[in-house]
Amino acid sequence: MSDLAIDIQHVVKRFEEHVAVRDLSLEVPRGSVYGLLGPNGAGKTTTIRMILDVIAPDAGTINIFGIPHDSAGVLDKVGYLPEERGLYKKMQVRRVLLFLAELKGIGMREASKRIDEWLERFSLNTAEKNWGDAKVDELSRGMQQKVQFIATLLHDPDLVILDEPFSGLDPINAQALKDAVVELKRRGKTVIFSTHVMDNAEKMCDSVCIIARGEKVLDGTVASVRQQHGAQNVAVSLADGAQNGVAAILRDGALVRQFDENNRFFEIEMTKGADPQMLLRRLIDAGASIERFELVQPSLHQVFIQRVGASGVETGMSGHG
Amino acid sequence: MDKKIFVVAKREYLERVRSRWFIAMTLLVPILMAGAFLFPIWMAARGSVSNQLGHIRILDATGAGLGERIAKAMYADSTLGIVAGDTVAPRVEVVSPAELSAKEQAAISEIQLRDHIAGVLSLTDSSIAGQSARYAGRNASNISDMDKLRTIVRQSAMMVRLEHEGVRPAIVDDLARSNMRLNAERVTEKGKSGSGTAGLFVGIIVGVLLFMSIIFHGQNILRGVLEEKATRVAEVVLSSVKPESLLAGKVLGVGAVGLTQQAAWLGIATYLTNFMAPIVMKAITAKGGAAAAANAAAASPIAGALGGISLGIIGIALAYFLVGFVFYACLYAAAGSMVNSEQEAQQAATPVMFLLISTWLMVNPVLVNPTSRLAVVLSWLPWSSPIIMPMRIGLTSVSPIEVIGSLIVAFLGCIGAVWLSARIYRVGMLMYGKKPSFGEVAKWIRYA
């Protein structure tokens, strides 16, 4: 058996007007949590759909657990949560789940038992009401998300693919999802998720791959990716924000190469050869009230901005991250 | 074969069969059908038994006893239900030609005042000559009453003249009782086979059922595909099952729904007809006697047609239903996968509807002349043969070679439709945004 949950080699997908994925190769180790990162339109969903044999690549090979992904039964080991959620609206929740489980080759009796467990676990079967017997469109959005998530995991897949799983989740459900991912990893499952929210990826992933415009920008373990991108970063928190000439200091090219401002928190990439201590002194001289000043490794977000840069980000990423 | 086809088919079947719409349609249609079978029987029975026609006054100014003759004929006619000694039985009054008009006025005033007299029949010399008689009454607009009355008057006038010409009274009475009924039988190369009207109705029933279920369930498939696409559930499903299998399961499941519904329709309608018919018949017999019942039975060829459906015809109709259904269902599914909204779907389905409607427009010419060249050509084309051929078989004799050949062509057409639709479906299901042009769809077909 292969050590790789997914092995993609030189995959190409062209659509009429553009190339969605060009010569993409990536390897996802078995048992890891893997982040597929990139701005909107980078080719994440196209890549995922090709893995799932929903669309066919124009060139290249895709293996799942060492077996070509279009072999019979391979996809029964994969659970998929698409970015665009959707269930049969007029169908009973229990019947939708049963149908999707049967499509993955689970027998009716076994599926039925598991559905009961999952409904219980996601508190969809309470003393007041068993939502399993309700129609899908009677459920709130949050409940529908839970049902969709149950559908993803009902057949106990070895590989779970989540496309933008955090989009539209409230903090409580987002936390539940994170817990679920951790549990899947503990049980030896492989989890791939795509996101453009770097913060989530940084906290959850063992390895990541950043793609932009259909091409791989970089990949590797989160630690190595951050290491490769230098230690010359400084995290600064200011009580008053960028007042009293702080802004001018940050724009001094001799000191700061670029910075990411979040009102009171700044992640600053130093110019090569510049001394962070100099930065600290100048900030104090300028009268800034410093709450935090720390030498850090760049965050994934910083790496992302640095590598994907102005090219892919402005159009694709506005408002995120 | 992919086992998942049956998982998909099972869902399609169960979800549809469980829906309120299906249950309502399945129960209501046969009740309407049974109603359509029994209503003519009931009408026929009602039409001939008028409780008014027997209650008339006859003013006889002929001096030749025509009035008596008519009254006698009315007593003899069981459909009028006149019992001897009835106070409201036809009453004959012999009058002179001079006083006829005054008596007539008096009778009309009486009709206006009293319920038990329906009308007044005035007979003159011209009635004997077979030219005219006058009737005034409440039921003058009842077509079957007037038909009956006209027949009785004409026959009676004829009898009076025959007697007058010296024909023996016994022979005249015998002639008066004669009741001619025409039984039509269809002749084919295989010899006589059932009644002509039965064949016609079998053909129409089979054709209409096929047409209706193709339209109804085809639209259902269209909507189902559209729903899967619009709710984005398609993506989850397609990550578990190949699009070809999804399409096949869908067509299989909905086709099974169609067959279930038709079996239920035929079953319930047959049961209702067989169960209700004796009750209706009994009611008629009780009221109008056996002759009325016989009349009624003759008026309803559809009831006879049900008995005229043989197993062979059912088998052939079933085969055509299957190929026709798969053909159109696939095309509908492809149309549904191309678009994103109900309005667009109707547009996309227009070419499919065109094939169906153009076939339907040809039904009448085929019914009129099932052996014409048009009918033969239509029973070979794969999109029209499933509707036209079972009809032709019901109407005339079609050689087995022609039936098998046309079935093979239809089957090949079916395979073509499956192939084409699977390709459009595969690409279309994940295409969102604007409606594709024909050029784009052609590209999908080539590159899928």
Image (tube, rainbow, N blue to C red):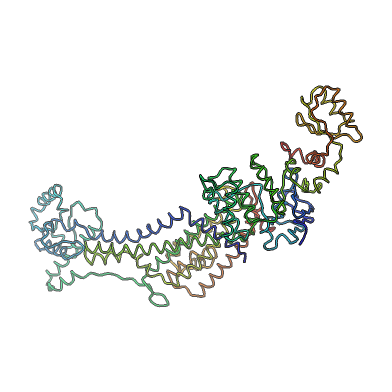
Residue A209: percent from left, percent from top: 78, 48
Looking at the image, residue A42 sits to the left or right of residue B381; the answer is right
Is residue A15 visible from the viewing direction of this image? Answer: no
Q: Residue B103: x percent and y percent?
A: 10, 51
Quadrant of the rendering where the C terminus of chain B is positioned: bottom right
Percent position of residue B242, x then y: 64, 59
Residue B195 versus residue B418 in the image, above or below: below
Determine whether B33 is above or below A224 in the image: below
Which of A90/A236 is in front? A236
In the rendered image, is residue A38 in sight? yes
- Seen in the image, is A213 located left or right of residue B438? right
In this picture, is A184 found above or below B166?
above
Relative to A93, B143 lies left or right: left
Count of marks overlaid on the render: 0
Of the pair A227 and B438, the residue shown nearer to us: A227
The N terminus of chain B sits in image quarter? bottom right
Residue drawn where x is 59% and y is 67% of the image: B412
Q: Nearer the viewer, residue A275 or B403?
A: A275
Q: Residue furthest bottom?
A: B190
Residue B303 pos. (x, y %)? 35, 65
| Residue found at the very far right of the displayed protein | A273
